[in-house]
Image (cartoon, helix red, strand yellow):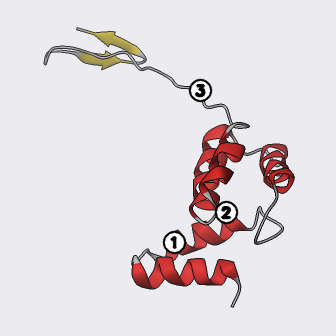
Amino acid sequence: MTKFEVFAKEKQYLLGVSPATLEWYEQSLRWLNTESPTEQELKDAVLRMRTAGLKPPSCNSRIHVLASDLPASALTVLTQFVQLKVYILPLVQGGNTAIKGNTYVG
């Protein structure tokens, strides 16, 4: 049994993850070409993700799957390549606020 198969079995039987989550893990782990990637292979995986059109949040979620099966040092290597943009949405205060189109009317 491969390391990836052991990873999936542990998640399925010990943590009780859903079949959809197992599929997500499988899709995420496919970005790696080896079970024990080097630093360069981790960088290449991120580059392939971005070249394929994945946005940084998608890369980030796949990186977390990869990092859960790799040593902690791998997370540092992977996340240094993904920049996440944070959008701060305006808060609307008060209970008498309505929204018309994209405009808040209070």
Q: Secondary structure at mark 2?
A: helix
The label nearer to you, 3 versus 1, is: 3
Residue 3 position in % (x across, y down)? 68, 80
Q: Is residue 93 above or below residue 63?
A: above
| Residue pointed to by mark 3 | 85
The label nearer to you, 1 versus 2, is: 2
Few, some or many C-alpha atoms within 10 Å of disc 3 (few <14, some 14-19, many ≥20)?
A: few
Q: CA distance from mark 1 to mark 2?
A: 12 Å
Residue shown at 78% from the left, 53% from the top: 42
Q: Identify the mark at residue 28; answer none if there is no mark.
A: 2
* Quadrant of the rendered image containing residue 27: bottom right
* Quadrant of the rendered image containing residue 14: bottom left
Residue shown at 61% from the left, 31% from the top: 84
Quadrant containing the N terminus is: bottom right
Q: Earlier in the sequence, mark 1 or mark 2?
A: 1
Q: Secondary structure at mark 3?
A: loop
Q: Earlier in the sequence, mark 3 or mark 1?
A: 1
Q: Earlier in the sequence, mark 3 or mark 2?
A: 2
The foreground one among 66 and 20 is 66
* Quadrant of the rendered image containing residue 95: top left
Q: Is residue 103 above or below residue 16?
A: above
Q: CA distance from mark 3 to mark 2?
A: 21 Å
Q: Tell me, yes or no, whether the two marked residues, 3 and 1, touch with CB atoms within 8 Å.
A: no
Q: Amino acid at mark 1?
A: Ala
Q: Is residue 84 above or below residue 67?
A: above
Q: Identify the mark at residue 20; answer none if there is no mark.
A: 1
Q: Amino acid at mark 2?
A: Ser
Q: Tell me, yes or no, whether the two marked residues, 3 and 2, touch with CB atoms within 8 Å.
A: no
Report whether 10 appears left or right of 71.
Answer: left
Q: Secondary structure at mark 1?
A: helix
Few, some or many C-alpha atoms within 10 Å of disc 2 (few <14, some 14-19, many ≥20)?
A: some
